[in-house]
Image: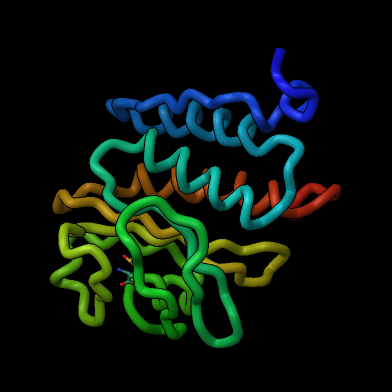
Amino acid sequence: MPPPEYASSRAAMSHAVTAYEFQDKPADYARLRAELAALLDGEHDLIANAANTAALLFGALPEVNWTGFYFLRGAELLVGPFQGKPACVRIALGRGVCGTAALERRTLVVPDVHAFAGHIACDTASRSEIVVPLIRGGELLGVLDIDSPRLQRFDAADARGLEEIARVFVASTTAATPAAG
Ligand code: SME
């Protein structure tokens, strides 16, 4: 018998992360979105849900070497939960891929990070990157950042899929009330 605190806690159940092949990106992102919603169900803590989202994405997405979050703190982004190598801690708004996506509040797909002026290299293995802004009730919360060691790893289908993933994450952090929009 597990200890009572485990027996009564759904969150203590192990979660087998599915590694999708992403041959059909819209379909696999839909499955991943459902998996994330189930994983985050009943929990609203920002850090806890960011940690589990980063871990789910790291296990599920092929050819990625960094998945994680930066959260807005004043005029800069501060690193949050992630999977991958240690990362730069603070990024000014407008700097790098993350700071640019945050400032412009739009998803940035960078096919070749070396061709992006101002790219901030955290892991030298990274060759391409996608950054999705996190918007909650019209306010910028931060960004979801994913790096790949392969050039041109991300396309428009990844952008759409990961924007939906970001929406599930943001909605989960809005305690008790469903996210607007
Ligand atoms: N490459 C990012 C910095 C964050 S790391 O990739 C984790 C950027 O240019 O903003």
Is 1 left, or right, of 69 in this rendering? Answer: right
- Up-down: is 54 above or below 145? above
* Spot occupied by residue 139 in the image (x, y as percentages of width and height): 67, 71
The single residue placed furthest to the right in the displayed view is 176
Q: 68 or 177, which is in the foreground?
A: 68
* Spot occupied by residue 133 in the image (x, y as percentages of width and height): 50, 64
Is 127 left, or right, of 131 in this rendering? Answer: left
Residue at image position (28%, 46%) is 64
* Spot occupied by residue 142 in the image (x, y as percentages of width and height): 55, 68
- Quarter of the image for the N terminus: give it: top right
Residue at image position (19%, 66%) is 113
Is 48 left, or right, of 179 in this rendering? Answer: left
* Spot occupied by residue 80 in the image (x, y as percentages of width and height): 51, 63
Q: 12 or 101, which is in the foreground?
A: 12
- Up-down: is 50 above or below 20? below
Residue 150 appears in the rendering: yes
Color theme of the render: rainbow
Residue 164 appears in the rendering: no
Is 172 left, or right, of 144 in this rendering? Answer: right
Name the quadrant containing residue 138: bottom right
Residue at image position (79%, 47%) is 178
Ligand 1's quadrant is bottom left
- Up-down: is 14 above or below 67? above
Residue at image position (21%, 73%) is 116
Q: 70 or 130, which is in the foreground?
A: 70
- Up-down: is 73 above or below 16? below
Q: How many numbered marks are there?
A: 0
